[in-house]
Image (tube, rainbow, N blue to C red):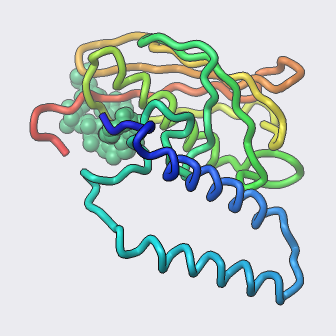
Amino acid sequence: MKSAAEHREFVDLVEALRAAQDTITGASPPEDVARKAREGLEEVTRLLAPFTVSEAEQLAGYLITEPGHAQALAPVLHVDESSTEHVRGRLVLGRYYLGGNGAAHGGSIPLFFDDVLGRLANDGGRGTSRTAYLHVNYRKITPVGQELRVEAHVDRVEGRKRFVVGTIHDPEGDLTVDAEGLFVALRPGQP
Ligand SMILES: CCCCCCCC/C=C\CCCCCCCC(=O)SCCNC(=O)CCNC(=O)[C@H](O)C(C)(C)COP(=O)(O)OP(=O)(O)OC[C@H]1O[C@@H](n2cnc3c(N)ncnc32)[C@H](O)[C@@H]1OP(=O)(O)O
């Protein structure tokens, strides 16, 4: 397992990337400011490109003790309580994940649940599995910029099949989403 303690600056870099994604998404800057911001981003790419590594050496997604695992792709779960069978925590969807009218983009929710349910499916010595399906029910809009409550747990295991379920509740305590994922344990040598 890769150690987040040895890569604090990289963890902070990914946090800064998330903040940039939120700020760019919410900004309507004058053209000269947009150009300066682009030049800054291009400088970041120039700086990091020589350090491109193979997937086995990649840090993003693999610093698993960090909230968000140092990967800017999926919304971050802040874990309050967890075991190998369940997790409870908080989620704030930033401006980057806005769909419209204050509601989160529909695609951001399965992205979040694939990560959270997938990690539970693979926890507890259950070994690597892959998502076979992810069923998401949108019961009420999921607001961006507000603290949401998340719960997920392993519902049942049938041979290689792991069924993992989760919910999101808004600050009023209303259910906004429930989801079920089927994760199938990989056979030896299966990609
Ligand atoms: C994941 C590794 C990451 C490693 C990173 C490590 C560090 C971090 C730690 C942890 C991170 C994890 C966090 C992220 C997790 C995200 C995971 C993903 O998003 S994976 C990408 C999206 N998913 C795919 O690309 C799958 C593509 N599909 C496949 O590969 C196969 O279809 C697979 C493996 C899902 C199943 O194929 P078969 O050939 O192995 O098995 P068959 O025999 O078809 O199915 C087994 C049983 O499952 C049922 N089944 C399969 N698919 C089903 C479906 N869609 N609906 C219902 N049942 C299904 C079948 O009916 C069968 O059931 P019966 O045993 O007969 O009872």
Between 4 and 17, the one nearer to me in the picture: 4
Residue visible at 49% across and 37% down?
114
Q: Quadrant of residue 79?
A: top right
Quadrant for the N terminus in the image? top left
Residue found at the far left of this picture: 189
Q: Quadrant of residue 140?
A: top right
Between 159 and 95, the one nearer to me in the picture: 95
Q: Is residue 101 visible?
A: yes
Ligand 1: image quarter: top left
Give the image location of residue 98, x and y in percent: 77, 53
Residue visible at 63% across and 46% down?
108
Q: Is residue 91 above or below residue 41?
A: above
Give the image location of residue 99, x and y in percent: 76, 54
Q: Is residue 150 above or below residue 17?
A: above
Q: Is residue 52 left or right of residue 13?
A: left
Q: Is residue 68 left or right of residue 84?
A: right
Residue visible at 58% across and 49% down?
12
Give the image location of residue 31, x and y in percent: 84, 88
Q: Quadrant of residue 113?
A: top right
Residue visible at 56% across and 19% down?
152
Quadrant for the C terminus in the image? top left
Q: Is residue 51 left or right of residue 173?
A: left
Q: Is residue 168 left or right of residue 87?
A: right
Between 176 and 16, the one nearer to me in the picture: 16
Give the image location of residue 167, x and y in percent: 65, 22
Q: Is residue 131 visible?
A: no
